[in-house]
Amino acid sequence: MTCFPTSQRSWIHAAVAGVVLAGSVSLLAKPEDLGLEAERMQRLDRVIETTIEDGRLAGTVLYVVRDGKPLVRTYGMFDVEAGTPMREDAILRIASMSKAITSVAVMMLYEEGRFRLNDPVSRYLPAFSRQIVAVAPPAGSPPGTPYGTEPAKRPITIRHLLTHMAGLTYGDGPAAAEYEAAGLGGWYFADKDETIGEVIDRLATLPLHGHPGESWQYGYATDVLGRFVEVVSGMPLDRFLEERIYRPLGMIDTCFFLPPEKADRLAPVYGYEGGKLVKNETSTTTDYIHGPRKCFSGGAGILSTAHDYGRFLQMLLNGGELDGVRILSPKTVELMHANHAGDKYRRDTDAFGLGFWVIHDLGFYGELGSEGAYGWGSAYYPQYLIDPKERMVAMLLTQLRPSGGLDLNQRFKVLLYQALDE
């Protein structure tokens, strides 16, 4: 399954007409309608515009919804060389923002009583039945000293996977060379001419890089969950997501691989290299159109738009429901943004839930925000947040890889919060 073809868009737009952001047709609020001071919002505008003028960014989409009222702004260029302005309906590679979608799919099956979160994943994916952990050689060992192994102290559970405490990295660790040899060095799966089931079975033969439950390690956990969804539901992951999440929420442009007819809306990927922006990937070269179209990465493989992903985030903000369609129960959403990592996650924030960071202690976070807010980002630079206290979702969406150290995707949050006047 792929994104809805253009021929199906009209009836879907009619069904979600409350917040439709397709092409030049938008039902948008003014900043003051969202409780944002227009003059203070200009600070955010100026920072984004200056970043673009300085040649650090091609263009971006700012998406904010508060109390159900959408504010969407585009800046700069969709395609610098072609002179095409940034468009609201740009289709973007969202990479690790895929993790929230796959995590919701897992929790939908959880609500159906298919498993418990503390079940071992090996009960459903037998390839994980015998896990070993790679142990680095002692400090001071001669170069080239091989790593050792030891049996995992406990099995990987579904909750370990949802919280990135399963001992799975993106191949980095003592057994990095073995991962690389197995074709598992990094998060990018769009070029793989094999199914996600084949990839995960091979992953299960490799050593873990930590004992499950003992440390927070970012990596292939959500890709394992994508395969888990397939096995438990009896459906390919792309079909499950389309039938159970995308269609009900009216997410018409969200998919793993793009129909060629939508190629003109796939944003080019720029990178800041050697002091200038360089176009690194276009619709004519991307694996998301021209690759094998075979491996469904629930951890980092989904394409989406501001409109589509915004509806998904709004569903979570609403406690699992949007426009009369319930995806999850309020209690399940509450569980998802509780702290499941104890004191083991100390990165963006001080807490981690079932698929995203959570602000548990605003003082630890040390920036403008709200306790209880949660979110994540993407290797291609976008960031999102969901703030139940402020009844708000927000995203800054672009395609920038590498970023050259630019932190606009974090600063935009500060500039947005400082504009709130109620």
Image (tube, rainbow, N blue to C red):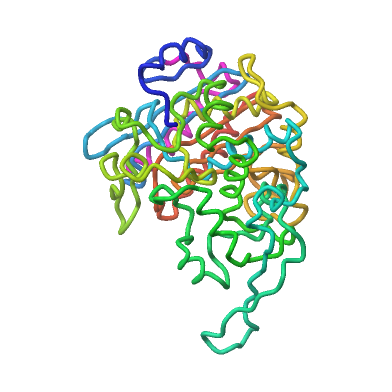
Looking at the rendering, the stretch of residues picked out in magenta corresponds to 26-53
Q: Position of residue 269 (x, y in %)?
A: 34, 44
Q: Position of residue 285 (x, y in %)?
A: 27, 45
The residue depicted at 67 percent of the width and 46 percent of the height is 162
The secondary structure that dominates the magenta segment is helix
Asked if residue 45 shows in the view, the reply is yes
The quarter holding residue 203 reads: bottom right
The residue depicted at 71 percent of the width and 47 percent of the height is 158
Question: Measured along the vertical axis of the image, is residue 51 above or below residue 84?
Answer: below
The quarter holding residue 82 reads: top left
Q: Position of residue 380 (x, y in %)?
A: 44, 46
Foreground residue among 124 and 379? 124
Tell whether position 34 is magenta. Answer: yes
The residue depicted at 30 percent of the width and 59 percent of the height is 274
Question: Measured along the vertical axis of the image, is residue 138 above or below residue 178?
Answer: below
On the picture, is 149 further left or further right than 238? Answer: right
Asked if residue 64 shows in the view, the reply is no
Foreground residue among 34 and 192? 192
The residue depicted at 39 percent of the width and 53 percent of the height is 402
Tell whether position 65 is magenta. Answer: no
On the picture, is 382 further left or further right than 99? Answer: left
Hey, which residue is sitting farthest left in the picture? 82
Question: Measured along the vertical axis of the image, is residue 176 above or below residue 12?
Answer: below
